[in-house]
Amino acid sequence: MGAADVLRGNDIGTMVTAAPALYPHMWSWDAAFISIGLAHLGVERAGQEIRTLLAAQWADGMIPHIVYGDRGGYFPGPGRWGTAELSSAAPSAPLTSGICQPPVHAIAVGRILEVARRGSEADRLAGEQLVRDCWDSLYRWHAWLSEYRDPSGTGLIGVVHGWESGMDNSPRWDRPYSAVVPGPDLPSYVRLDRELVRDGAERPTDVEYDRYLWLIEEMRRASYDPAKVYDTCSFLVADVFVSAIFAVASDVLADLGSDFGAPASEVADLRMWAARSRAAVAASCSPETGLARDFDRRTNTWIDVETLAGFAPLISGGLSPDAERALLDELHGPRWAGHPSLVAKVPPTVSPDSEGFKSREYWRGPQWPVVSWLFGWAHARHGYAAESERLRAETLKLVGDGAFSEYYEPVTGEALGSRKQSWTAAVILDWLD
Ligand code: 2M8
Protein backbone atom coordinates (compact mmCIF):
# COMPACT_ATOMS: atom_id res chain seq x y z
CA MET A 1 0.00 0.00 0.00
CA GLY A 2 1.31 3.47 -0.89
CA ALA A 3 1.09 6.77 0.92
CA ALA A 4 -1.76 7.99 -1.29
CA ASP A 5 -3.80 4.88 -0.45
CA VAL A 6 -3.34 5.56 3.26
CA LEU A 7 -4.78 9.05 2.92
CA ARG A 8 -7.62 7.87 0.68
CA GLY A 9 -8.38 5.03 3.07
CA ASN A 10 -8.57 7.38 6.06
CA ASP A 11 -10.71 9.92 4.19
CA ILE A 12 -14.25 9.98 5.56
CA GLY A 13 -15.43 12.73 3.21
CA THR A 14 -14.68 16.13 4.65
CA MET A 15 -11.87 14.97 6.89
CA VAL A 16 -9.01 12.53 6.78
CA THR A 17 -8.86 10.95 10.22
CA ALA A 18 -5.48 11.09 11.93
CA ALA A 19 -5.35 7.28 11.93
CA PRO A 20 -7.90 4.57 11.12
CA ALA A 21 -8.53 3.11 14.58
CA LEU A 22 -6.49 4.91 17.23
CA TYR A 23 -7.42 8.45 16.13
CA PRO A 24 -10.72 8.34 14.22
CA HIS A 25 -11.21 12.16 14.17
CA MET A 26 -9.42 15.29 12.99
CA TRP A 27 -6.44 16.60 14.97
CA SER A 28 -5.39 20.18 14.40
CA TRP A 29 -1.73 19.86 13.54
CA ASP A 30 -2.24 16.48 11.88
CA ALA A 31 -4.80 18.12 9.59
CA ALA A 32 -2.25 20.72 8.53
CA PHE A 33 0.36 18.12 7.59
CA ILE A 34 -2.31 15.92 6.01
CA SER A 35 -3.44 18.81 3.82
CA ILE A 36 0.12 19.11 2.49
CA GLY A 37 -0.01 15.45 1.46
CA LEU A 38 -3.48 15.90 -0.01
CA ALA A 39 -2.23 18.77 -2.17
CA HIS A 40 -0.32 16.18 -4.19
CA LEU A 41 -3.56 14.29 -4.82
CA GLY A 42 -5.69 17.36 -5.52
CA VAL A 43 -5.48 20.96 -4.40
CA GLU A 44 -9.26 21.24 -3.90
CA ARG A 45 -9.26 18.33 -1.46
CA ALA A 46 -6.32 19.82 0.41
CA GLY A 47 -8.22 23.07 0.77
CA GLN A 48 -11.27 21.18 1.99
CA GLU A 49 -9.22 19.76 4.85
CA ILE A 50 -8.13 23.21 5.98
CA ARG A 51 -11.68 24.52 5.60
CA THR A 52 -13.09 21.69 7.72
CA LEU A 53 -10.63 22.52 10.46
CA LEU A 54 -11.31 26.24 10.29
CA ALA A 55 -15.06 25.66 10.40
CA ALA A 56 -14.44 24.42 13.94
CA GLN A 57 -12.46 27.50 14.99
CA TRP A 58 -13.79 28.98 18.21
CA ALA A 59 -15.41 32.41 18.18
CA ASP A 60 -12.42 33.82 20.09
CA GLY A 61 -9.95 32.55 17.45
CA MET A 62 -8.64 29.31 18.97
CA ILE A 63 -8.27 26.36 16.61
CA PRO A 64 -9.20 23.33 18.72
CA HIS A 65 -6.92 20.34 18.94
CA ILE A 66 -9.60 17.80 18.01
CA VAL A 67 -12.55 18.24 15.67
CA TYR A 68 -14.83 15.27 16.26
CA GLY A 69 -16.36 13.45 13.33
CA ASP A 70 -19.52 11.39 13.63
CA ARG A 71 -17.83 8.25 14.88
CA GLY A 72 -16.98 7.61 18.50
CA GLY A 73 -14.04 5.36 19.21
CA TYR A 74 -11.73 7.81 20.96
CA PHE A 75 -11.35 8.78 24.57
CA PRO A 76 -11.70 11.54 25.68
CA GLY A 77 -14.66 12.20 23.39
CA PRO A 78 -16.67 15.42 23.19
CA GLY A 79 -18.82 14.53 26.21
CA ARG A 80 -15.81 14.48 28.48
CA TRP A 81 -14.78 17.97 27.34
CA GLY A 82 -18.27 19.47 27.38
CA THR A 83 -16.99 22.51 25.50
CA ALA A 84 -20.24 23.40 23.73
CA GLU A 85 -22.17 23.40 27.03
CA LEU A 86 -19.55 25.26 29.04
CA SER A 87 -18.14 27.87 26.67
CA SER A 88 -20.02 30.35 24.49
CA ALA A 89 -16.92 30.58 22.26
CA ALA A 90 -16.98 26.88 21.38
CA PRO A 91 -18.99 25.64 18.40
CA SER A 92 -21.78 23.15 18.96
CA ALA A 93 -21.37 21.71 15.48
CA PRO A 94 -18.89 20.25 14.97
CA LEU A 95 -17.99 19.33 18.52
CA THR A 96 -14.42 19.96 19.58
CA SER A 97 -11.93 19.55 22.41
CA GLY A 98 -11.08 22.58 24.55
CA ILE A 99 -7.33 23.01 23.98
CA CYS A 100 -5.13 23.68 20.95
CA GLN A 101 -2.02 22.32 19.21
CA PRO A 102 1.11 23.74 17.51
CA PRO A 103 0.27 26.43 14.91
CA VAL A 104 1.67 24.77 11.79
CA HIS A 105 -1.35 25.73 9.68
CA ALA A 106 0.09 28.73 7.86
CA ILE A 107 3.11 26.60 6.94
CA ALA A 108 0.70 24.09 5.41
CA VAL A 109 -1.22 26.70 3.46
CA GLY A 110 2.04 28.15 2.15
CA ARG A 111 3.19 24.72 1.04
CA ILE A 112 -0.18 23.93 -0.60
CA LEU A 113 0.13 27.18 -2.56
CA GLU A 114 3.61 26.20 -3.77
CA VAL A 115 2.34 22.82 -4.93
CA ALA A 116 -0.73 24.45 -6.52
CA ARG A 117 1.35 26.93 -8.48
CA ARG A 118 3.35 24.14 -10.04
CA GLY A 119 0.18 22.37 -11.17
CA SER A 120 -2.59 23.18 -13.63
CA GLU A 121 -4.33 26.53 -13.96
CA ALA A 122 -7.23 25.13 -11.92
CA ASP A 123 -4.81 24.07 -9.18
CA ARG A 124 -3.25 27.49 -9.08
CA LEU A 125 -6.62 29.18 -8.80
CA ALA A 126 -7.73 26.77 -6.08
CA GLY A 127 -4.52 27.37 -4.12
CA GLU A 128 -4.84 31.13 -4.37
CA GLN A 129 -8.50 31.00 -3.39
CA LEU A 130 -7.57 28.96 -0.34
CA VAL A 131 -5.15 31.64 0.81
CA ARG A 132 -7.80 34.34 0.37
CA ASP A 133 -10.41 32.27 2.18
CA CYS A 134 -8.34 31.30 5.19
CA TRP A 135 -5.94 34.17 5.78
CA ASP A 136 -8.19 36.06 8.16
CA SER A 137 -8.99 32.98 10.25
CA LEU A 138 -5.32 32.17 10.53
CA TYR A 139 -4.53 35.74 11.54
CA ARG A 140 -7.18 35.49 14.29
CA TRP A 141 -5.64 32.20 15.42
CA HIS A 142 -2.19 33.77 15.74
CA ALA A 143 -3.73 36.78 17.50
CA TRP A 144 -5.40 34.40 19.98
CA LEU A 145 -2.09 32.71 20.75
CA SER A 146 -0.40 36.03 21.24
CA GLU A 147 -3.14 37.47 23.44
CA TYR A 148 -4.06 34.47 25.57
CA ARG A 149 -0.91 32.36 25.63
CA ASP A 150 1.62 35.13 25.92
CA PRO A 151 -0.31 37.89 27.69
CA SER A 152 2.85 39.68 28.86
CA GLY A 153 4.43 39.66 25.42
CA THR A 154 7.52 37.60 26.25
CA GLY A 155 7.61 35.86 22.87
CA LEU A 156 7.28 32.41 24.45
CA ILE A 157 3.87 30.84 23.92
CA GLY A 158 2.36 28.97 26.85
CA VAL A 159 0.71 25.56 26.81
CA VAL A 160 -1.77 24.49 29.48
CA HIS A 161 -1.68 20.77 28.72
CA GLY A 162 1.05 18.47 27.40
CA TRP A 163 -1.36 17.55 24.58
CA GLU A 164 -1.11 21.14 23.36
CA SER A 165 2.59 20.65 22.66
CA GLY A 166 1.81 17.66 20.43
CA MET A 167 4.61 15.83 22.26
CA ASP A 168 2.29 14.50 24.93
CA ASN A 169 4.57 12.57 27.29
CA SER A 170 7.93 14.11 26.41
CA PRO A 171 10.29 14.09 29.41
CA ARG A 172 10.17 17.89 29.08
CA TRP A 173 6.85 17.73 30.85
CA ASP A 174 7.71 15.36 33.69
CA ARG A 175 8.48 18.06 36.22
CA PRO A 176 5.54 20.36 35.46
CA TYR A 177 3.26 17.31 35.44
CA SER A 178 4.51 16.26 38.87
CA ALA A 179 2.68 19.34 40.18
CA VAL A 180 -0.60 18.23 38.59
CA VAL A 181 -2.29 16.32 41.37
CA PRO A 182 -5.56 14.71 40.35
CA GLY A 183 -8.31 15.37 42.90
CA PRO A 184 -10.42 12.60 44.43
CA ASP A 185 -13.33 13.91 42.37
CA LEU A 186 -11.68 13.02 39.03
CA PRO A 187 -14.55 11.27 37.24
CA SER A 188 -13.72 7.68 36.35
CA TYR A 189 -12.86 6.79 32.77
CA VAL A 190 -11.77 3.96 30.52
CA ARG A 191 -8.86 4.36 28.15
CA LEU A 192 -9.45 3.07 24.62
CA ASP A 193 -5.91 3.53 23.33
CA ARG A 194 -4.58 0.65 25.39
CA GLU A 195 -6.81 -1.78 23.52
CA LEU A 196 -5.58 -0.55 20.16
CA VAL A 197 -1.84 -0.45 20.76
CA ARG A 198 -1.01 -3.91 21.99
CA ASP A 199 2.27 -3.10 23.69
CA GLY A 200 1.22 -0.76 26.50
CA ALA A 201 4.83 0.44 26.82
CA GLU A 202 4.40 2.35 23.54
CA ARG A 203 1.75 4.63 25.09
CA PRO A 204 1.66 7.00 28.11
CA THR A 205 1.10 5.39 31.52
CA ASP A 206 -2.11 5.46 33.58
CA VAL A 207 -0.53 7.90 36.03
CA GLU A 208 0.11 10.24 33.10
CA TYR A 209 -3.45 9.80 31.85
CA ASP A 210 -4.91 10.71 35.25
CA ARG A 211 -3.05 14.00 35.03
CA TYR A 212 -4.17 14.60 31.46
CA LEU A 213 -7.78 14.07 32.52
CA TRP A 214 -7.44 16.15 35.65
CA LEU A 215 -6.33 19.14 33.58
CA ILE A 216 -9.53 18.80 31.58
CA GLU A 217 -11.48 18.97 34.86
CA GLU A 218 -9.64 22.15 35.79
CA MET A 219 -10.45 23.70 32.42
CA ARG A 220 -14.09 22.69 32.65
CA ARG A 221 -14.22 24.50 35.98
CA ALA A 222 -12.87 27.62 34.26
CA SER A 223 -15.51 27.19 31.51
CA TYR A 224 -12.65 27.21 28.99
CA ASP A 225 -12.30 30.96 29.46
CA PRO A 226 -8.74 31.35 28.08
CA ALA A 227 -7.65 34.04 30.55
CA LYS A 228 -9.01 32.06 33.50
CA VAL A 229 -7.43 28.86 32.25
CA TYR A 230 -4.07 30.62 31.93
CA ASP A 231 -4.36 31.92 35.48
CA THR A 232 -5.66 28.80 37.20
CA CYS A 233 -4.57 25.67 35.36
CA SER A 234 -1.98 23.74 37.34
CA PHE A 235 0.12 23.15 34.19
CA LEU A 236 1.48 26.24 32.43
CA VAL A 237 4.70 26.00 30.48
CA ALA A 238 6.17 28.39 27.93
CA ASP A 239 6.84 25.90 25.13
CA VAL A 240 9.90 26.64 23.07
CA PHE A 241 8.97 24.36 20.17
CA VAL A 242 5.46 25.78 19.83
CA SER A 243 6.99 29.26 20.05
CA ALA A 244 9.43 28.48 17.25
CA ILE A 245 6.61 27.18 15.08
CA PHE A 246 4.58 30.26 15.94
CA ALA A 247 7.49 32.50 14.87
CA VAL A 248 8.10 30.90 11.50
CA ALA A 249 4.39 30.37 10.76
CA SER A 250 3.76 34.05 11.55
CA ASP A 251 6.42 34.94 8.99
CA VAL A 252 4.86 32.65 6.40
CA LEU A 253 1.43 34.14 7.08
CA ALA A 254 2.80 37.67 6.88
CA ASP A 255 4.39 36.88 3.49
CA LEU A 256 1.11 35.44 2.22
CA GLY A 257 -0.70 38.50 3.59
CA SER A 258 1.60 40.93 1.77
CA ASP A 259 1.16 39.01 -1.49
CA PHE A 260 -2.60 38.81 -1.20
CA GLY A 261 -3.39 42.33 -0.02
CA ALA A 262 -4.16 41.69 3.66
CA PRO A 263 -4.45 44.74 5.95
CA ALA A 264 -0.99 46.24 6.54
CA SER A 265 -1.52 46.53 10.30
CA GLU A 266 -2.25 42.81 10.56
CA VAL A 267 0.79 41.91 8.49
CA ALA A 268 2.81 44.18 10.80
CA ASP A 269 1.40 42.37 13.86
CA LEU A 270 2.53 39.05 12.44
CA ARG A 271 6.01 40.37 11.71
CA MET A 272 6.26 41.69 15.26
CA TRP A 273 5.09 38.39 16.79
CA ALA A 274 7.52 36.48 14.59
CA ALA A 275 10.49 38.66 15.55
CA ARG A 276 9.59 38.57 19.24
CA SER A 277 9.15 34.81 19.40
CA ARG A 278 12.26 34.15 17.30
CA ALA A 279 14.32 36.24 19.70
CA ALA A 280 12.77 34.60 22.76
CA VAL A 281 13.45 31.09 21.45
CA ALA A 282 17.07 32.03 20.73
CA ALA A 283 17.41 33.60 24.19
CA SER A 284 16.11 30.45 25.89
CA CYS A 285 19.20 28.45 24.90
CA SER A 286 21.10 26.85 27.73
CA PRO A 287 24.57 28.31 28.21
CA GLU A 288 25.80 24.76 28.87
CA THR A 289 24.23 22.71 26.08
CA GLY A 290 23.20 25.36 23.56
CA LEU A 291 19.75 23.74 23.39
CA ALA A 292 16.60 25.84 23.70
CA ARG A 293 14.59 25.36 26.89
CA ASP A 294 10.98 25.50 27.99
CA PHE A 295 10.09 27.70 30.94
CA ASP A 296 7.77 26.52 33.70
CA ARG A 297 5.55 29.51 34.42
CA ARG A 298 4.10 28.00 37.57
CA THR A 299 7.49 27.64 39.27
CA ASN A 300 9.34 30.30 37.25
CA THR A 301 12.14 27.92 36.35
CA TRP A 302 13.84 26.79 33.16
CA ILE A 303 13.33 23.15 32.23
CA ASP A 304 16.77 21.77 31.54
CA VAL A 305 15.68 18.49 30.00
CA GLU A 306 17.43 17.59 26.78
CA THR A 307 14.97 16.58 24.03
CA LEU A 308 14.53 17.16 20.31
CA ALA A 309 12.50 20.28 21.13
CA GLY A 310 15.78 21.90 22.16
CA PHE A 311 16.57 22.31 18.46
CA ALA A 312 13.66 24.75 18.13
CA PRO A 313 15.92 27.62 16.94
CA LEU A 314 16.57 25.61 13.78
CA ILE A 315 12.85 25.95 13.07
CA SER A 316 12.55 29.66 13.82
CA GLY A 317 16.04 30.95 13.01
CA GLY A 318 17.51 33.93 14.83
CA LEU A 319 20.77 32.50 16.23
CA SER A 320 24.15 33.93 15.29
CA PRO A 321 25.62 32.08 12.28
CA ASP A 322 28.14 30.27 14.50
CA ALA A 323 25.59 29.21 17.09
CA GLU A 324 23.21 28.06 14.35
CA ARG A 325 25.91 26.00 12.68
CA ALA A 326 26.85 24.42 16.00
CA LEU A 327 23.23 23.50 16.73
CA LEU A 328 22.79 22.09 13.22
CA ASP A 329 25.93 19.97 13.61
CA GLU A 330 24.71 18.78 16.99
CA LEU A 331 21.34 17.72 15.52
CA HIS A 332 22.99 15.74 12.74
CA GLY A 333 25.91 14.58 14.87
CA PRO A 334 26.63 11.46 16.92
CA ARG A 335 24.39 12.26 19.90
CA TRP A 336 21.27 12.74 17.77
CA ALA A 337 20.44 11.90 14.14
CA GLY A 338 23.94 10.58 13.52
CA HIS A 339 24.00 8.38 16.61
CA PRO A 340 25.89 5.18 15.67
CA SER A 341 23.16 2.92 17.05
CA LEU A 342 20.41 4.28 14.77
CA VAL A 343 19.10 2.40 11.74
CA ALA A 344 18.25 5.64 9.93
CA LYS A 345 19.87 9.03 10.49
CA VAL A 346 16.65 10.66 11.61
CA PRO A 347 16.57 12.62 14.87
CA PRO A 348 15.08 10.64 17.76
CA THR A 349 12.82 12.53 20.17
CA VAL A 350 15.31 11.90 22.97
CA SER A 351 19.00 11.14 22.43
CA PRO A 352 19.97 7.49 23.05
CA ASP A 353 22.71 8.97 25.24
CA SER A 354 20.18 10.73 27.51
CA GLU A 355 19.07 9.26 30.78
CA GLY A 356 15.40 9.63 29.83
CA PHE A 357 15.69 7.73 26.52
CA LYS A 358 13.07 5.00 26.11
CA SER A 359 13.40 3.49 22.67
CA ARG A 360 9.74 2.37 22.33
CA GLU A 361 7.88 4.90 24.40
CA TYR A 362 6.01 7.42 22.31
CA TRP A 363 7.58 10.89 22.66
CA ARG A 364 10.39 9.61 24.90
CA GLY A 365 12.78 8.34 22.23
CA PRO A 366 11.19 7.05 19.00
CA GLN A 367 11.63 8.80 15.67
CA TRP A 368 8.58 10.61 14.27
CA PRO A 369 8.63 11.08 10.47
CA VAL A 370 6.39 14.14 10.73
CA VAL A 371 8.87 15.92 13.00
CA SER A 372 11.69 15.09 10.59
CA TRP A 373 9.66 16.66 7.80
CA LEU A 374 9.29 19.83 9.85
CA PHE A 375 13.03 20.05 10.44
CA GLY A 376 13.64 19.23 6.77
CA TRP A 377 11.27 21.99 5.69
CA ALA A 378 12.93 24.46 8.06
CA HIS A 379 16.43 23.44 6.93
CA ALA A 380 15.46 24.12 3.32
CA ARG A 381 13.95 27.47 4.28
CA HIS A 382 17.06 28.54 6.15
CA GLY A 383 19.44 27.49 3.36
CA TYR A 384 20.60 24.07 4.60
CA ALA A 385 19.71 22.10 1.49
CA ALA A 386 22.10 19.18 2.10
CA GLU A 387 20.81 18.57 5.63
CA SER A 388 17.24 18.85 4.42
CA GLU A 389 17.88 16.28 1.72
CA ARG A 390 19.55 13.97 4.23
CA LEU A 391 16.49 14.02 6.47
CA ARG A 392 14.31 13.26 3.46
CA ALA A 393 16.42 10.33 2.28
CA GLU A 394 16.88 8.86 5.75
CA THR A 395 13.18 9.16 6.66
CA LEU A 396 12.23 7.46 3.39
CA LYS A 397 14.58 4.67 4.40
CA LEU A 398 12.92 4.45 7.82
CA VAL A 399 9.40 4.18 6.44
CA GLY A 400 10.47 1.83 3.66
CA ASP A 401 8.51 -0.99 5.35
CA GLY A 402 5.28 0.59 4.03
CA ALA A 403 3.57 0.54 7.44
CA PHE A 404 3.33 4.35 7.62
CA SER A 405 3.64 4.09 11.35
CA GLU A 406 3.08 6.82 13.83
CA TYR A 407 6.64 6.43 15.18
CA TYR A 408 9.66 4.13 14.90
CA GLU A 409 12.04 2.40 17.27
CA PRO A 410 15.32 4.11 16.43
CA VAL A 411 17.72 1.25 17.10
CA THR A 412 15.82 -1.50 15.29
CA GLY A 413 13.66 0.54 12.91
CA GLU A 414 10.56 -1.31 14.15
CA ALA A 415 7.21 0.33 13.34
CA LEU A 416 5.41 1.43 16.53
CA GLY A 417 2.09 2.95 17.60
CA SER A 418 -0.63 3.25 14.99
CA ARG A 419 -0.13 1.92 11.45
CA LYS A 420 -1.44 3.88 8.44
CA GLN A 421 -0.98 7.11 10.36
CA SER A 422 -2.15 9.87 8.03
CA TRP A 423 0.49 12.49 8.74
CA THR A 424 3.26 9.96 8.17
CA ALA A 425 1.79 9.15 4.75
CA ALA A 426 1.26 12.84 4.03
CA VAL A 427 4.85 13.93 4.63
CA ILE A 428 6.11 10.99 2.60
CA LEU A 429 3.89 12.06 -0.30
CA ASP A 430 5.30 15.55 -0.09
CA TRP A 431 8.83 14.21 0.03
CA LEU A 432 8.29 11.90 -2.94
CA ASP A 433 7.13 14.83 -5.04
C1 2M8 B 1 -1.15 12.13 19.92
O1 2M8 B 1 -1.96 12.78 20.87
C2 2M8 B 1 -3.28 12.30 21.24
C3 2M8 B 1 -3.89 13.35 22.16
O2 2M8 B 1 -4.04 14.57 21.50
C4 2M8 B 1 -3.29 10.96 21.94
O3 2M8 B 1 -2.23 10.46 22.33
O4 2M8 B 1 -4.38 10.40 22.11
C5 2M8 B 1 0.07 13.05 19.70
O5 2M8 B 1 1.09 12.39 19.02
C6 2M8 B 1 -0.34 14.31 18.96
O6 2M8 B 1 0.77 15.10 18.65
C7 2M8 B 1 -1.10 13.97 17.68
O7 2M8 B 1 -1.60 15.14 17.10
C8 2M8 B 1 -2.26 12.99 17.96
C9 2M8 B 1 -2.93 12.47 16.68
O8 2M8 B 1 -1.96 11.97 15.80
O9 2M8 B 1 -1.81 11.86 18.71
Image (cartoon, rainbow, N blue to C red):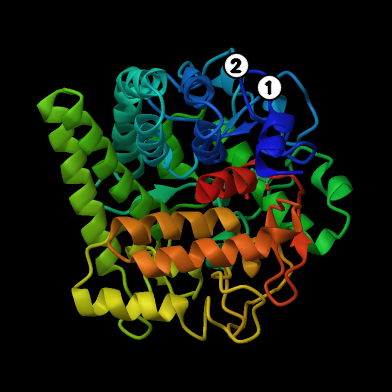
Query: Residue 202: where, in percent of width, then height?
Result: 77, 61
Q: Disc 1 or 2, which lies upstream in sequence? A: 1
Give how far apart the Cα atoms at labels 1 and 2 are.
Answer: 7 Å
Q: Quadrant of residue 230?
A: top left
Residue 286 location (% of width, % of height) = 34, 78
Residue 150 vertical placement versus 349 (above, below): above
Residue 138, percent across and down?
Answer: 34, 29
Where is residue 98 shown, x and y percent of the image?
Answer: 55, 31
| Image: 118 above or below 278 | above
Q: Quadrant of residue 244?
A: bottom left
User: Horizontal placement of 72 versus 355: left or right?
Assistant: right
Q: Which residue is mark 1?
A: 69
Q: Amino acid at mark 2?
A: Pro
Q: Secondary structure at mark 1?
A: loop
* The one of 158 and 214 positioned closer to us in this rendering: 158
Q: Which residue was labeled with disc 2? A: 94
Which quadrant does the N terminus fall into?
top right
Q: Residue at x 31, y 25 (%)?
A: 135
Depicted 424 relative to depicted 318: above or below: above
Classify residue 185 as left or right of residue 143: right
Report the front residue among 183 and 339.
339
So how many labels did they put on this image? 2
Q: Is residue 293 visible?
A: no
Q: Amino acid at mark 1?
A: Gly
- Which residue corresponds to the image point at 54% horizontal and 70% vertical from the top-left? 347
